[in-house]
Image (cartoon, rainbow, N blue to C red):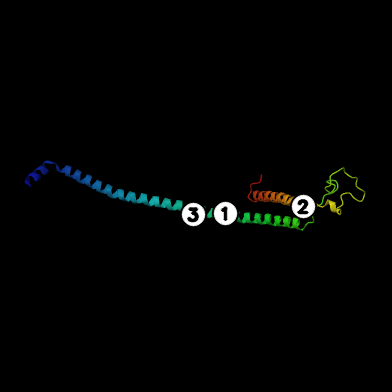
Amino acid sequence: MMAVLGMLRIVPSWCYWILALVALCLGCEIHGAGRVQAKWEAQVKQQQAAAEAALELRREQNRAIGAEQALKSAQIQKGYDDEMAKVRADLRNSERLRLGAAWCDGGTPGPAQASSAAGGDAAGTAGRILPPELDSAVRALIGQAEEAAATARAAQQFIRDNGMAP
């Protein structure tokens, strides 16, 4: 033990003070690093919480916009359905379609006959009524044309309602 004490006395005392100061600084650094790490983790958590709050706010805004768009879409669809229901009812309740003499002569081939003054395009001639299958085909075409037109009007309404019109 005396040999160890003898060797320790060879080192000047100021070296021990420097060694103690370095140990103290290292201890403070280690302790300070923990505080810095804690502050950094707290800041990261705060940023994550702020980002999550902003994301939730955006989700809520998106839900509100979606609900508004669904309402507009339902209104446009209702208008389209009402319009198509009226068209279908009109087609269903209308008389059989007729063609005037200017279009056909009752379906009989041959030379065109001159019509009398009482003839003309009058609706009372039985030969000018379309056959049932042709009548239903023409009505189906009219319905398809009206449906396309109603779809176009609904699309125009959607464009106007959402501020996309020029």
**Of the pair 104 and 110, the residue shown nearer to us:** 110
Q: Which of marks 1 and 2 is nearer the N terminus?
A: 1
Residue 13 image point, x, y percent: 15, 43
Instruction: Name the mark nearer the viewer: 1 or 2.
Output: 2
Task: State the residue in front, 166 or 89.
Answer: 89
**Residue with the mark numbered 2:** 135
Cβ–Cβ below 8 Å for labels 1 and 3?
no
Residue type of the residue flagged with mark 3: Glu
Estimate the spatial distance between the alpha carbons at disc 1 and disc 3, rounded to whole Å: 15 Å
- Residue 12: give x, y in percent of width and height: 14, 41
Q: Which of 98 and 8 is in front in this view?
A: 98
User: Quick check: 29 left or right of 52?
Assistant: left
x, y percent for residue 82: 69, 57
Q: What residue is at 75 percent from the left and 57 percent from the top?
A: 92
Tell whether 163 sits left or right of 132.
left
- Give the image location of residue 67, x and y in percent: 58, 56
Within 10 Å of disc 3 (Cα), the crowding (few <14, some 14-19, many 20+) is few
Where on the picture, by quarter, is residue 17? top left
**Gap in Å between the C-alphas at discs 3 and 2?**
59 Å
For the residues carrying marks 3 and 2, which lies nearer the camera in this image?
2
SS class of the residue under badge 3? helix
Estimate how packed mark 1 is, as few (under 14), some (14 to 19) or many (20 or more) residues with alpha carbons within 10 Å. few
- Which mark is drawn over residue 26? none
The three-letter amino acid code for the residue at tag 1 is Gly
Task: Using the image, tell me which numbered label, if any, was put on residue 56.
Answer: 3
Q: To which residue does mark 1 refer?
A: 66
Q: Give the quadrant of the C terminus.
A: top right
Total marks placed: 3
Amino acid residing under circle 2: Asp
